[in-house]
């Protein structure tokens, strides 16, 4: 850290506190050479990986796109907004903690579909129809058959 006025590295911290938004630490500092004071903010750098789209393009992780897609799939279904937000928080944290610089949109989509399947079958099929680009009713029927088969298998396993 250098003084922004005289470029000296002899600086002391006078005061530290959490910023108003609670996402950074605000520090009041004083240069020991020129005696001028200034404020700095320390913030944890959130680094989410780039998302590799199906066509090969790369774009920044966009939390709101995922949120909107899940919200539409869960419309008029018994899934709370809190559940959706908690899931997206956990997904974003998982991506940040992975340390990867890039992640496939397919990985993210499959995680979303897995969660929707646990929450609600209708929301799952709605999301799958868009995510997997169902072209006709046959695609819907195939997905429903797989869903019913997995439900039947899990019911017979627990019996």
Image (cartoon, rainbow, N blue to C red):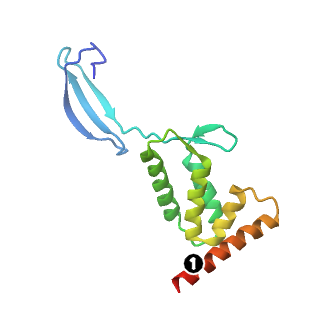
Q: Which residue is under mark 1?
A: 154
Q: Quadrant of residue 73?
A: bottom right
Q: Position of residue 91 (x, y in %)?
A: 49, 54
Q: Residues within 10 Å of mark 1 (few under 14, many from 20)?
A: few
Give above or below for 72 relative to 8: below
| Quadrant of the snapshot with the N terminus | top left
Q: Position of residue 114 (x, y in %)?
A: 57, 63
Give above or below for 85 relative to 9: below
Which residue appears at 66% of the width and 72% of the height?
147
Give above or below for 124 relative to 155: above
Decide if residue 134 is on the left or right side of residue 96. right
Q: Residue 152 versus residue 13: which sits nearer the camera?
A: 152
Q: Position of residue 102 (x, y in %)?
A: 54, 40
Q: Quadrant of residue 72?
A: bottom right
Q: Quadrant of residue 113?
A: bottom right
Q: Residue furthest top?
A: 6
């Amino acid at each position: 850290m250098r003084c922004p006025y005289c470029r000296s590295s002899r600086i002391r911290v006078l005061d530290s506190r959490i910023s108003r938004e609670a996402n950074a630490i605000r520090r009041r500092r004083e240069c020991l050479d020129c005696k001028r004071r200034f404020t700095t903010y320390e913030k944890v750098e959130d680094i989410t990986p780039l998302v590799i789209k199906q066509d090969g393009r790369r774009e920044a992780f966009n939390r709101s796109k995922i949120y909107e897609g899940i919200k539409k799939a869960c419309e008029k279904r018994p899934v709370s907004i809190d559940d959706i937000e908690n899931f997206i928080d956990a997904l974003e944290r998982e991506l940040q903690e992975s340390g990867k610089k890039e992640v496939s949109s397919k990985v993210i989509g499959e995680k979303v579909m897995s969660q929707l399947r646990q929450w609600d079958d209708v929301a799952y099929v709605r999301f799958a129809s868009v995510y997997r680009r169902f072209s006709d009713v046959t695609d819907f029927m195939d997905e429903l058959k797989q869903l019913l088969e997995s439900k039947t298998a899990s019911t017979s396993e627990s019996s």
